[in-house]
Image: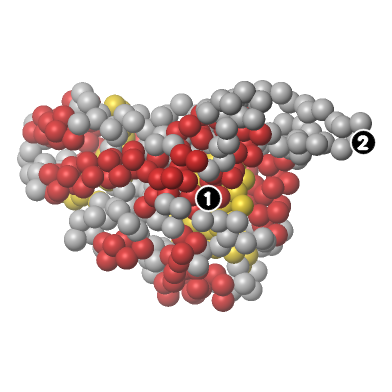
Amino acid sequence: MKIDTLAVHSGRRIDPSTGAVTPPIHLSTTFERGPDGEYPHGFSYTREDNPNRKALEECLAALEGGKEALAFSSGLAVATALVQGLEPGDHIIAPDDVYYGLRKVIGEVFGKWNIETAYVDMTDLAAVRAAVRPTTRLVLVETPSNPLLKITDLAAIAGIARKANAISVCDGTFATPVLQRPFEHGIDMVMHSTTKYVAGHSDVLGGALVTRFDNYLFERARKSQRYGGSAPSPFDCWLTLRGISTLPLRVRAMAESAARIASFLGTHPAVETVHYPGLAHHPGHEIAARQMSGFGAMLSIEVFGGKAEAMAAAARMKVFTRATSLGGTHSLVEHRASVEGPTSKTPQGLLRMSIGLESVEDLIGDLSAALGRTIP
Ligand SMILES: *Cc1c(COP(=O)(O)O)cnc(C)c1O
């Protein structure tokens, strides 16, 4: 079945006791045992499993075309579960521009665990190959990346990881399963911050880990979810699954607007650079065209005049909301360097935009008015 159908039907059944078309929310933390001591419906205690979580996991696995999925309380809970599955002395290869929260998980949560990490430019395949060690167990890739929208060749990275006997994990948050299918390029597992596009309404935190086949890191992540207690609540699962129903429609509409906005900004005199993989001059354009079915709805621009002009332009926007995060219905703009703090390598003149569901004319009008006064 096509992803649009899976997004509406996967994980949902008509409720047999009431006929309800929309699934009920099962808040119960505990489930009745049969007289034989067994659990006839397969549920015993909500930390371990719950009908809403099971439904969400079924749907997430179907969307990616994977074998199985685990739902977590946030995207970073997925990262935490993955690193927890490693042994002291193990080595990770991660993108040099990895989502900054992931760097914090590795460096600050696991700082004392003797996990070694090489942060590498994943677009430089020779550098990735050179970073491999006998102890490399996990190769992380994030494409498109944040906030420069760098594109990594998934098939090439999957090949390097396989040769190294390491597990490759793609953070597919920006692309969503609608626009990019990492398993078709040989990637072993996919993670998402479902907080973003998957749930899609900026009202629920969540994360997902989807696997293509059984492996020990996935099994250890399952333990972290069930016994470590990082599962999402039934209501969070319900909201996320509801959001998924419109995921394909939302993502395509937003990506269409983003492409129009990127070409508008590309010729704007106040804008020094536009980072959007759909533009022909973007260094990752060819790979993106090959491995994605659309270029997504995230873009960033660098304005002339550095931080002061970037902040001033964002301050003048009226339709775009100044806020972090992405993938919701509201278009958001963010001065990324100030969010990432003093160690950030993000250019000071950079504004990242998450294009939402407003009219593209209104969004372009807003940008036009806000940037008009920045023209040098
Ligand atoms: C937001 C984000 C995360 C972290 O997810 P949370 O749900 O905020 O914990 C991880 N990776 C990417 C690419 C993200 O955008």
Residue 54 visible to the viewer: yes
Q: Nearer the viewer, residue 261 or 244?
A: 244
Q: Residue at x 42, y 75 (%)?
A: 126
Measured as percent of width and height from the top left, residue 338 is found at 36, 36
Residue 92, quarter of picture: bottom right
Residue 51, quarter of picture: top right
Point out the frontmost of discs 1 and 2: 2
Vertical relation: 186 (above or below) 15 = below
Measured as percent of width and height from the top left, residue 370 is found at 14, 30
Which quadrant of the rendered structure holds the C terminus?
top left
Measured as percent of width and height from the top left, residue 287 is found at 32, 65
Measured as percent of width and height from the top left, residue 52 is found at 62, 33
Q: Earlier in the sequence, mark 1 or mark 2?
A: 2
Identify which amino acid the numbered label 2 is placed on: Asp
Q: Residue at x 21, y 23 (%)?
A: 318
Q: Secondary structure at mark 1?
A: helix
Disc count in the image?
A: 2
Question: On the rendered structure, is 177 left or right of 14?
Answer: left
Residue designated by label 2: 36
Q: Secondary structure at mark 2?
A: loop
Q: Nearer the viewer, residue 328 or 103?
A: 328
Q: Nearer the viewer, residue 137 or 58?
A: 58
Question: On the rendered structure, is 347 left or right of 371?
Answer: right
Disc ID at residue 103:
none
Residue designated by label 1: 62
Residue 118 visible to the viewer: no
Q: Residue at x 51, y 35 (%)?
A: 241
